[in-house]
Amino acid sequence: MNQYRIAVIPGDGIGPEVMTENVRILQTVAAIDRSFSFEFQTFSWGCQYYLQTGKMMPEDGMEQLRSFDAILLGAVGYPGVPDHISLRELLLKIRHDFDEYINLRPVRLLKGAPCPLKAENTQNIDMIFVRENSEGEYSGQGAWLYKNSPQEVVIQHGVFSRKGTERVIRYAYELARKERKTLTSISKANALNYSMVFWDQIFEELGKEYPDVKTSKLLVDAAAMFMVKDPKRFQIVVTSNLFGDILTDLGAAIAGGMGLAAGANINPEHKYPSMFEPIHGSAPDIAGRGIANPLAAIWSASQLLDFLGYEEWGARIVDAIEKMLAEKHALTPDLGGSASTSECGKALAGILKQLS
Ligand code: NAD
Ligand code: IPM
Ligand code: MN
């Protein structure tokens, strides 16, 4: 029996609410399968912890996480703690320090999920975003000069290393080859005359090694427009950290909403633990009411199962989510239902048991 040690960081706001259901689903799957099991350890780090200790995680927090097979994260950030502190010292720190340089975000419209694009159907919206996740506009480098003077200037660097850019683009080419899908690179070289010229150049260079992969390139503004007007043109998509952040919220909007959008932060070399999370935040506007949609977090658990090599289970979880959507069964208010977070999670666990 394979045993996996999973670190659980529920975090803030609706994070702990959706995490309970996420863990429930993984426990359900392990209990049915019996060839593997999970041992969960919870770390109560986040904004509450910060207000008590002045830190988002303990000094040795990263060491504590290091030996785990994977991390599940709920959401980080809450009014009362500045976002640039809470996020940079917990979520972004883990992504960066564990070199989780691939952020895999499916944008897939399941049957029954609400889509604001009237003409669209489920086959037309089925993409995977490969978002650069370790550098770019998120490098945290810059300067704040002449503070509070009329000469005040702020500089926020976008850092694109050859290593960092090549590895994410190569990952996307490999994925497109493996899945026999097209690859679209999204950049902005018409305005960003260093970073995105470099990005485009590397995309072209590596393309020579993948003559079998059909590619296209889009500027990010046009890409945003096409995601709405003609989403079927996208299959595998590779883009920078910031563009990937923004476009995957747009992706969430066309594929059922934030309550259905998942992401995996992957260190492909398995040198450090990878981290799985919904792409939504702590949703302070609905936190504490037990109505948050847990399906995004649960979809990220399916990505964890894929990552551990249990792709059949990963697919079964997404199928079970689709069944609930198609039958309008036990959905939370964001999807037009009246179920609570835990009713939704329990219903999904029930479907998984039935399917097995
Ligand atoms: P948000 O994703 O928390 O919320 C945006 C909107 O979507 C809200 O109306 C919210 O109610 C709704 N929503 C989000 N998730 C939902 C779910 N599971 N079920 C039902 N409705 C859901 O974004 P925000 O309001 O911009 O950010 C709130 C806080 O979260 C900020 O501190 C922000 O920095 C942080 N944040 C964290 C993460 C993360 O931890 N990965 C991601 C995004 C934002
Ligand atoms: C996401 C979030 C984070 C990001 C924030 C909270 C730092 O928006 O995971 O999409 O920008 O990556
Ligand atoms: Mn985001």
Image: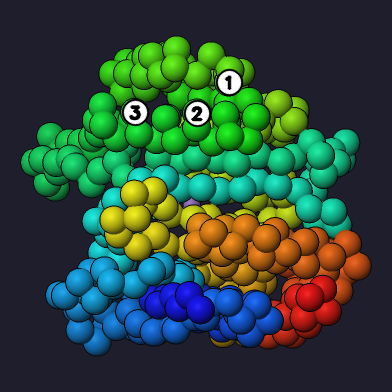
Quarter of the view holding residue 93: bottom left
| Residue 65 versus residue 173 in the image, above or below | below
Q: Return the disc, 2 or 3, that comes first in the chain's sequence.
A: 3
Q: Residue at x 46, y 24 (%)?
A: 187
* Image quadrant containing the C terminus: bottom right
| Residue 166 versus residue 292 in the image, above or below | above
Which residue in the rendered view is the most extreme toward the right?
Answer: 327
- Residue under numbered circle 1: 213
How far separated are the C-alphas under marks 1 and 2?
Answer: 7 Å
Is 29 placed left or right of 243 in the picture?
A: right
- Residue under numbered circle 3: 166
Q: Residue at x 85, y 41 (%)?
A: 121
- Residue under numbered circle 2: 173
Element at label 1: loop
Is 13 placed left or right of 285 in the picture?
A: left
Mark 2 C-beta closer than 8 Å to ligand 2: no
How many circles with numbers are drawn on the protein? Answer: 3
Q: Nearer the viewer, mark 1 or mark 3?
A: 1
